[in-house]
């Protein structure tokens, strides 16, 4: 989880406290971020250290069990950071539209580079 969110700290759009809050939330609240079959969206509240907006994409080499009976195992992580509640909700809505497209997962599985993933997202967003 930390590895998936670390780029936000490196990019200056989240503090280490934001990352720590995600991990703490997972330990205390369970798999609240496993929101769909095979999909986790790790995130924390904006006031926990969000300095900007961003969404990451991580395709796991081996699926991970987070303890979500309905949605495990997780194959895709989409870490999210948003500096305010409005940005947070907008990012979740945009992501939900992508995740509702079965072709998006096929494209993720076929992508071999970060550039191909970005192209896929741009293509799918253009069709929404």
Image (spheres, rainbow, N blue to C red):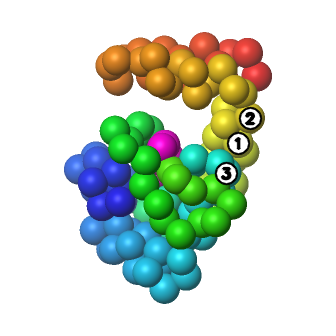
Q: Determine which residue is flagged by label 2.
A: 100
Please tell me whether the stretch drawn in magenta is mainly helix, strand or loop: strand
Residue 88 lies in the magenta-colored region: no
Judging by the rendered image, the residue that carries numbered circle 1 is: 96
The quadrant in which residue 21 appears is: bottom left
Mark 2 element type = loop
The tag earlier along the polypeptide, 1 or 3, is: 3
Q: Label 2 vs label 3: CA separation?
A: 10 Å
Residue in the picture at 64% in, 66% down: 69
Q: Position of residue 22 (x, y in %)?
A: 43, 70
At 35% from the left and 55% from the top, the residue drawn is 5
Mark 1–mark 3 distance (CA, rounded to whole Å): 9 Å
Point 57% across, 56% down: residue: 72
Pick the front one: 14 or 64: 64
Query: Which quarter of the image is occupied by the C terminus?
Result: top right
Badge 1 element: helix
At horizontal 74% and vertical 35% (from top left) the residue drawn is 100
On screen, residue 33 above or below 23: above
Count of picture labels: 3
Q: Which mark is residue 36?
A: 3
């Amino acid at each position: 989880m930390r590895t998936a969110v670390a780029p936000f700290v490196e990019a200056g759009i989240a503090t280490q406290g934001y990352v720590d809050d995600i991990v703490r939330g997972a330990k205390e609240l369970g798999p609240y971020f496993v929101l769909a079959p095979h999909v986790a969206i790790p995130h924390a509240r904006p006031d926990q250290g969000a300095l900007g907006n961003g969404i990451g994409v991580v395709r796991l080499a081996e699926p991970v069990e987070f303890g979500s009976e309905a949605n495990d195992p997780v194959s895709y992580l989409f870490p999210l950071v948003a500096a305010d509640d409005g940005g947070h909700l907008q990012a979740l809505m945009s992501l939900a539209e992508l995740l509702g497209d079965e072709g998006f997962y096929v494209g993720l599985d076929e992508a071999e580079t970060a550039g191909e993933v970005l192209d896929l997202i741009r293509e799918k967003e253009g069709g929404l």
